[in-house]
Amino acid sequence: MSKKLLLKNDHIEGIHTLPIYRANGGYSVLEKALKTMSPEAILEEVKTSGLRGRGGAGFPTGLKWSFLAKPEGVPRYLVCNADESEPGTLKDRYLMERHPHILIEGMIVSSFALGAKTSYIYIRGEYFYIARILEIAIKEAYEAGFLGKNIQGSGYDLDLYVQVGAGAYICGEETALLESLEGKRGNPRIKPPFPAIAGLYGCPTVVNNVETIAAVVPILEMGGAEYAKIGTEKSTGTKLISASGHINKPGVYEIELGIPVEEFIYSEEYCGGISGGKKLKAVVAGGSSVPILPAELILKTSAGEPRMMSYESLGDGGFLTGTMLGSGGFIVMDEDTSIVKNLYTFARFYHHESCGQCSPCREGTGWMEKILLKILDGRGDMKDIDLLWDIQSKIEGKTICPLGEAAAWPVAAAIRHFRSEFEEYIQYPEKIRDIKHYYRLQETATA
Amino acid sequence: MAKVTIDDITIEVPDGTSILEAARIIGGDIAPPAMCYYSKLKTSGGYCRTCIVKVEQGSAKDPRPMPKPVASCRTTVMDGMVVRNITSPENLEARAGVVEFLLLNHPLDCPICDQAGECDLQDLAYKHGEEETRYQFPRREFEPEDIGPYIKLNMNRCILCYRCVKVADQITDGRCHGVVNRGEVSQISTYIEQAIDNDFSGNMIDVCPVGALTDKTFRFKSRVWYTKPVDAHRDCPKCSGKVRLWYQGEEVLRVTGRKDQWGEIENNEDGSTAWICNDCRFDKKETKDWVIEGPTHVNRRSVISANHYEGLAAIKADTLRMLGSQPHGVKVDLGEGALDPNNE
Amino acid sequence: MTTTEIQFDSETLALVNNMMKRYPEGKHKSALIPVLHIAQAEFGGWLSVPTMDYVASVMNLKPIEVYEVASFYSMFNMHPVGKCLIEVCRTSSCWLRGAEDVIDHIEKRLNIRVGETSADGMFTLKAVECLGSCGTAPMMQVGADYHENLTIEKVDTLLEKFKDENKQSRYC
């Protein structure tokens, strides 16, 4: 069994309630931190731990915290990004649903470290029922004196609120999230300034993913140096992986970073192998935005080394032969999967989720979706493959926010690794009829 | 002060200047095209991406290049920064890509568009775009929306620059239109089809870089290249009263604000922007309403600045080539002599 | 256009006013999205112009500010929907595990296509993008509830249940 930190109490009935969380050691980190540690000491522990942002970008959390401006007389905010919307990702939902108090405890100690007096958890609107769970847990925490005025006699005050969104993937981008939290359209802001200087209501703000904030609890419990011993040198600690697709045991798994991908897919502890005993065709390892890799490249690097579940090993080979750990949304596809059709669902997704603010993304995402639909409708042209390639290259890096890249990368990777499948559909349109629900594509194409 | 080098030309500018403003000081083709940025509107810019440039060196202190092209209108110069605009083929290619995106769903209805001849998108397309589009699908169309007696909204031509929204926010006394919906179907709208009616709403027409917002009182009356710009003023209780009258023969067909070489409304002596009120724009169309200052020359770009009527044959050929390359084969006949300067 | 028939009851109004106080002074616009959720649930499952104008007046905002925000987010229905709004996820992971079978089945059962409302006004079927239920795919959301690991049989049972309950689905 690999090490569990966030989900170590997953088997305990009622762990979502404060008394049971507390009986299992919960809120002891808060007491230790508020009574015996200075904010600077907490920041040092987080830096030492090597924790990297768990939302997808993998930016070092301690470094992000250290950028926070601290002008006199200006409030600072910590905002938790619970807008989990990256296709293939459901880990934050799992954690919040079953372990709301670890997030709340993490929010309190992190807010203390950053000097925030008011903090928000921004959760995607579709997770309304989880917002309720969090609200109940927050109420418990207030009643137990872990939130509100003079927390546990430390003199530190904190108010914590849950804010719901209303259906927009783009609000997972931190500045779009802040706009949405201010009651506006979720249009990403033009940077600079970065939130650390001017974030929520123009005040210095740190935005962190749910899992990142929760991980602060075990880091302070065991100390940053101990945490850094878990995992690999560049990928410390544990990571929640959302496993989905054609596997025997889909779900959320906490892994120690650095275990082999092969073990993750095939061992009984995790995915339990490909469903129906079929062969593995491809994996999207870190949520829909990251490059898809064919079986041979996800199991082994181009140098023939076993591929590991870590930031550096999944990134080995760059985008030519590697991918990214991203948000840990691990989507597995069996030998019968149409990569082009899967790409089409991604392209449709990004088209639907583009905010429309800047031109390359607003116009380009829809264009790519239309071309993919045309190919899947049997009207493709060989030139369309190069056109798709060119469009994605003209979106990538030209947009206000990373949604441009998120939309471009899957297209580039699918063409890079599965070009022959595109060609086959174009040359032999009858092949497309093998895709289940072919008629639905036809209908959409004529609509 | 910060020293910045743009396309191998080094200048010194005050701290806080944007790359685009620095490039405008150098002038000429080195100034990147701007479709959404408008120096007189706060928080404008950053959306259209046409002004992107390559930053080869971030600053003297941190000489690393910037990883992606940046919007020059919203990026501040740093001391020792090295920027490439027209001297980077890569940057020009990226810009051509942006132009293609902006034109992707554009109706290319220049022959019936009142903005033609003074349209920033037309100029941008000629200068920075490719000859043909690669888009093979029906173009997006929006339901027409009536926004009152003065301003014609044609959403199909809009590039979502947000300038009109910022005008409504910053210089009128109550915004009732904005951007509604999301993504590809985002649109400028009042949502409830109401008239946009306040003293300064007409400035939305002047800031619109395309033919999405045009003057209803000038609609289909002429082509801008047949009209002659004359600067004039009046003593107006509401605004500066400094306008440009557009004459055809003896008749004032249109009144607009006075635009500078970057297509922006000029400043008053006191440094404020010479926005004009709706009375001056829509109700004062007689020569006797005005103190005439004299004919003016419209600077830079566009068919008008092509010395009024010279060189139109080349533009006509360009227009036809551009329209003729439409995938749907829209056939456009501008008519014999339509562009003939003697055809007034 | 009157807004007289659209009005929060005193308890809801108190909740809304309280909500606006969560934010620093002058930043009460932050409550707009939560308040729109309440308004949508209270006034027929969608946001009509009178409903949005009412929200604008309660929150002291310009109506256009409300229209802009409401029309941006996919959970706000800008047109009337059936009493029970069924949202089936169709993005990658759900597609891989048979979301289209589920959609097909519901279409046949209710005799409507995606995007349509049944003749009796009871059901609207929507195909939506990733709802974060990839590990329990296929799934559908009805109101605040996630129905996961769907099978055709499960879908049938659910549809029966919704019909019997005859309740308006609501997120909050």
Image (cartoon, coloured by chain):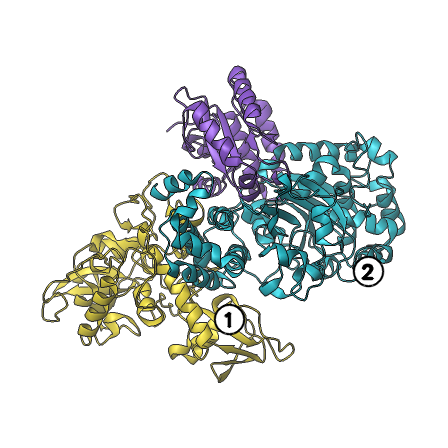
| Residue hosting label 1 | B18
Q: Nearer the viewer, residue C64 or B319?
A: B319
| Residue hosting label 2 | A48
Q: Residue at x 78, y 35 (%)?
A: A141
Chain letter for cyan?
A
Amino acid at the residue labelled 1 = Ser
Q: Residue at x 13, y 71 (%)?
A: B341
Q: Nearer the viewer, residue B319 or B46?
A: B319
In this rendering, the answer to whether B248 lies above or below A89 is below
> Colour in which chain C is shown?
purple
The crowding category of the residue bearing disc 1, from other C-alpha atoms within 10 Å (few below 14, some 14 to 19, many at least 20), is: some
Q: Residue furthest right?
A: A36
Q: Position of residue A197 (x, y in %)?
A: 65, 60
In this rendering, the answer to whether A107 lies above or below A406 is above
Dot 2 lies on which element? helix
Mark closer to the observer (1, 2) = 2
Q: Position of residue B177 (x, y in %)?
A: 39, 46
Chain of the residue under label 2: A
Chain letter for yellow?
B
Dot 1 lies on which element? loop
